[in-house]
Image (cartoon, grey):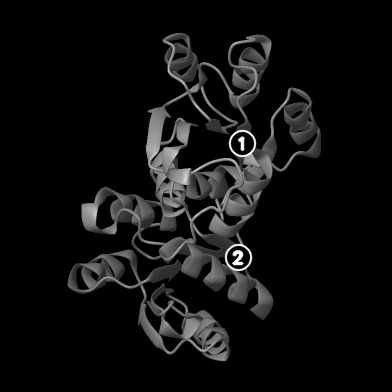
Amino acid sequence: MTKLLIQDLTILLVEPSVTQQKIILTNLAEAGVEKVDCVDSGKAAIAHLKRMTPDLVISCMYFPDMTALELIHHIRAETTLSTLPFMLVSSEVRFGRIDPIKQAGVVAILPKPFDFESLNTALKNTLHFLEPDELDLLNYDPTELRVLVVDDSALARKFIIKTLAGLGIHTITEANDGKAAVGILQAGEQFDLIVSDYNMPEMDGKALVEYIRQDETIAHIPVLMVTSEQNRAVLNNIEQVGVSAICDKPFEPQNVKQLLANILN
């Protein structure tokens, strides 16, 4: 089967600024992407998505009628669009505004202004998300791996599960926070891997890893921590409790594939 290429991508660009539209379109054209439809509001984007589904939505943060977060929540609520790749281009840096976007599941977040290489990498991530390669492991068959995904965001869990499924992993159990994960582990369910968010209510990812590492019956299970946390001191604390690897949000398929290969091999 012919692999999807960057120049094959169909894109919906949501950007009210004509100047920003031109800048993004110029960079997309340089990458070889020509099939781009432009709209200038959230409502126009929703109407467009009802008529046709692109391979990728590229969006700014703020429109006259809504925000990118509201748009992505609408997209994720639609069954036929729930796994549609979404890329944010924004000068917004406030954690409280950016983190909910990361939690909703995006393939990339690019700053304004962005460079061509960043855009090209984000487009490649989109291809890997749309047509991922299965994991190639020495000691495991990916289809037989049992994975526990722990995240208080249902949207984030859905995005992570879609990425794992693309890598050939289909036996997946969900927990909506660390406390729920502990309950599942105490019930005796067996897992080959745990993928956990860091920031969660009730019991965060750090406390969950500490619990796992102190129980000799499950201490051997590899834990991949997925977090949007950028504070180096916090990340160091996470590393010290015994995580197998830390993965940034957005959850990039190729990066995840390499991390899982390293952990499981």
The answer to whether 99 is drawn above or below residue 1 in the figure is: above
Front residue of 18/106: it is 106
Residue 244 position, x and y percent, is 69, 34
Distance from the alpha carbon under mark 2 to that under mark 1: 24 Å
Q: Is residue 20 visible?
A: yes
Residue 149 position, x and y percent, is 47, 33
Q: Residues within 10 Å of mark 1 (few under 14, many from 20)?
A: many
**Residue that sits furthest to the front in the current view:** 139
Residue at image location 40% in from the left, 80% down from the top: 2
Please name the amino acid that badge 1 sits on.
Leu
Residue 116 position, x and y percent, is 65, 80
Front residue of 24/173: it is 173
Q: Residues within 10 Å of mark 2 (few under 14, many from 20)?
A: some
Residue at image location 55% in from the left, 45% down from the top: 99
Front residue of 177/144: it is 144
Q: Which mark is residue 224?
A: 1
Q: Which mark is residue 110?
A: 2
Residue at image location 44% in from the left, 74% down from the top: 15
**Residue that sits furthest to the left in the current view:** 51
Q: Nearer the viewer, mark 2 or mark 1?
A: 1
